[in-house]
Image: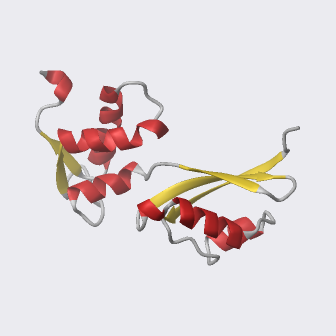
Amino acid sequence: MAKEITGYVKLQVKGAAANPAPPIGPALGSKGLNIMEFCKQFNARTQDKAGQVVPVVITVYSDKTFEFVLKTPPAAVLILEAAKVKSGSASPNRNKVGSLTWEQVQKIAETKMPDLNCFTMESAMKMVAGSARSMGVTVTGKAPWEN
């Protein structure tokens, strides 16, 4: 028989750096979960993503057990990494902080594809390019589908 789900907890934690300090401790403690057990499992599964922000969705069951699913890093984090800038622009319509090529946009879209609600690489690239534009990062060159 399936376990009864009592709730979900969504967090963004740096890979291989989970510890019981806030925000993890209070979020899981309020649900009655074993915080150290989550930290050990999370750190073990994110060894290859050390330092990257990793969103995680934790499913909480009625018997105080849990399962968690790792998501891909946020598009904004990947865009900042690729553009080699520290943060987005405060006024993206006026001040541009960096630029990406369409090849970089494609790599980010391929990484994000499992978590995006689109079916084609073209639409995934358009979503990533839109996120970049709203951060003040320009996409240089000609889009691959405009040939």
In this picture the colour scheme is: secondary structure
In depth, the one of 135 and 45 nearer the eye is: 45
Residue 10, placed above or below residue 106: below
Q: Position of residue 14 (x, y in %)?
A: 48, 66
Residue 79, placed above or below residue 26: above
The quadrant in which residue 113 appears is: top left
- In the image, is 125 to the left or to the right of 26? left
Count of marks placed on residues = 0
Q: Is residue 113 visible?
A: yes
In depth, the one of 86 and 61 nearer the eye is: 61
Query: In the current view of this chain or complex, which residue is farthest to the bottom?
Result: 21
Q: Position of residue 34 (x, y in %)?
A: 76, 68
Q: Residue at x 62, y 69 (%)?
A: 40
**Which quarter of the image is occupied by the C terminus?**
top left
The quadrant in which residue 84 appears is: bottom left
Q: Residue at x 19, y 40 (%)?
A: 103
In depth, the one of 127 and 25 nearer the eye is: 25
Q: Is residue 95 visible?
A: no
- In the image, is 98 to the left or to the right of 119? left
Q: Position of residue 76 (x, y in %)?
A: 36, 53
Q: Position of residue 58 (x, y in %)?
A: 67, 54
Q: Residue at x 48, y 32 (%)?
A: 117
Q: Residue at x 51, y 49 (%)?
A: 71
- In the image, is 99 to the left or to the right of 48? left
- In the image, is 13 to the left or to the right of 78? right
**Which quarter of the image is occupied by the N terminus?**
top right
